[in-house]
Amino acid sequence: MPIVNLIYEQRLAVEQRERQTRMLVLTMVGVGALAFLATGFFLFETARFQLMSGELEARKQKLKPMMDQLAGNQLDLRDMEPRLKTLRDAVKLTEQWNRIMDHVAVNTPGDVWFTSFRSNVSDPARGVQVSFGGYGTTQSAIGELQLRLATSTDLSKVGLRFSQERLIDQARALEFQIDATVTGTEKKPVVKKKDDKAKGAG
């Protein structure tokens, strides 16, 4: 009959259980330590973010008067935008008229003189119309004036309306009128979109 050492087997089982218990305890201690470190890290980060949030809030409160002033300035600017546009347009048109006058002064032939200068806007789609009236000694001098006016980048559609002979102080001269359009003053027609047309039809 074989001899069975039950005490040895019991001791092996006890040792195995003790090892498992130690591994379990060590695992729990490790997990607990990690949890403790993670909790500490998150608490530290939370405190840091709260501190940063407090600083940002303090800066926000400090900048609030400036932000309110900026918002007020933007509202004022929005209200003044139409006036600013009108002023810019006026400055642009004044500069354009100065260039036109300089061009006329430099490019008028010696045997032509002006008696009238008119501008009007009878039709916004056609733009600002300008008329140069005066006298010339010859038809070629009037034609030369017309050609010189046409070289101005600020004048377009330059054309001779009429020229006719007149008696002035017992001398004959040719009265003329040259018409032109000030470049860039024509109002472009508003093109309706298809959706607008459909709404109008409905």
Image (cartoon, rainbow, N blue to C red):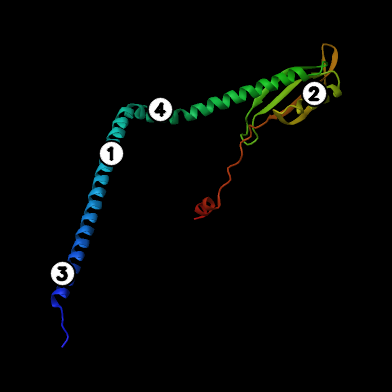
Q: Which residue is mark 4?
A: 73
Whichever of labels 1 and 2 marks the residue nearer the N terminus, that label is 1
Q: Which mark is residue 145?
A: 2
Q: Amino acid at mark 2?
A: Leu
Residue at 25% x, 52% y: name it: 34
Residue type marked 1? Arg
Q: Is residue 16 left or right of residue 146?
A: left
> What residue is shown at x 31% (from left), y 27% (from top)?
62
For the point 26% across and 42% down, the residue is: 44
Q: Which residue is mark 1?
A: 48
The relative height of residue 128 versus residue 44 in the rendered view (above or below) is above
Indicate which label's residue lies in the foreground, 4 or 3: 3
> Which of labels 3 and 1 is toward the front?
3
Q: Which mark is residue 14?
A: 3
Q: Label 1: state its secondary structure.
A: helix
Question: Cβ–Cβ below 8 Å for labels 3 and 1?
Answer: no
For residue 70, above or below residue 137: below
Give whichever of discs 3 and 1 has the lower sequence position: 3
Q: Nearer the viewer, residue 26 or 71?
A: 26
Q: Position of residue 158 (x, y in %)?
A: 75, 30
Question: Which image quadrant is residue 149 in?
Answer: top right
Give residue 69's position: percent from left, percent from top: 36, 27
Q: Decide which of 177, 166 is in the foreground and name it.
A: 177
Helix, strand or loop status at disc 2: helix
Calculate the distance from the C-alpha at mark 4 to the C-alpha at mark 3: 84 Å
Three-letter residue code for mark 4? Asn
Calculate the distance from the C-alpha at mark 1 to the C-alpha at mark 4.
36 Å
Q: Quadrant of residue 165?
A: top right
Q: Earlier in the sequence, mark 4 or mark 3?
A: 3
